[in-house]
Image (spheres, helix red, strand yellow):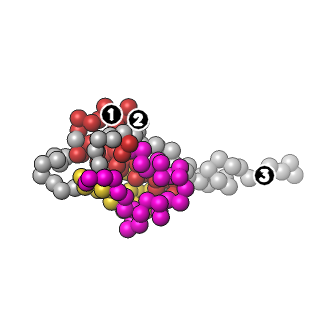
Amino acid sequence: MTTKKDNRYFEAVGRRKTSVARVRLVPEAKNSFSINGRSLAEYFKTENLRQAVEKALAATPELHFSVSAKVSGGGVTGQADAIKLGIARAILVYDGELRPVVKKDGLLTRDPRAKERRKFGLKKARKSPQWSKR
């Protein structure tokens, strides 16, 4: 665990479904985002996804960071949630005393839901072949 005195940036990993996001926070004068080298509005086209990512920084309005994220795998919703979790974890690396504030908003809970694996003898995870009497 790093402290805020010996590093220029604070890094954490967030995951959701099959998406993995490596997030770096650099203290700045105002919030800015770079996701896979693109801006937040350029990467996430819908307002809901942008709000999900910004929700992690909204928990601590007095702090401002430049957010740089490398995200891979999954779809855009999973990637947005992975970045949100990564930002929340990186804020804790920056200052561990912010944990109650971040936890109150439910930002530290990793969503464990993922696609269930397919079983043999079935068409999908739980769907069985059509039954025929004869």
Residue at 41% across, 66% down? 38
Instruction: Using the numbered discs, state the Cα–Cα distance from disc 1 to disc 2 in whole angstroms.
Output: 7 Å
Question: Sequence-wise, which precedes: disc 3 or disc 1?
Answer: 1
Q: The disc labelled 1 sits on which kind of residue?
A: Val
In this rendering, the label closer to the viewer, 3 or 1: 1
* Residue, disc 3: 130
Question: Sequence-wise, which precedes: disc 3 or disc 2?
Answer: 2
Disc 3 secondary structure class: loop
Which residue appears farthest toward the right when viewing the image? Answer: 134
Magenta segment: 28-56
Instruction: Classify 60 as above or below 42.
Output: above
* Residue, disc 2: 105
Disc 2 residue crowd, few under 14, some 14–19, many 20+, Cα 10 Å: few
Residue at 29% across, 49% down? 64
Q: The disc labelled 2 sits on which kind of residue?
A: Asp
Instruction: Classify 58 as above or below 8.
Output: above
Instruction: Using the numbered discs, state the Cα–Cα distance from disc 3 to disc 2 in whole angstroms.
Output: 45 Å
- Residue 11 location in percent, x, y? 27, 54
Q: Is residue 35 magenta?
A: yes
Q: The disc labelled 3 sits on which kind of residue?
A: Gln
Mark 1 touches mark 2? (CB < 8 Å): yes
Disc 2 secondary structure class: loop
* Residue, disc 1: 101
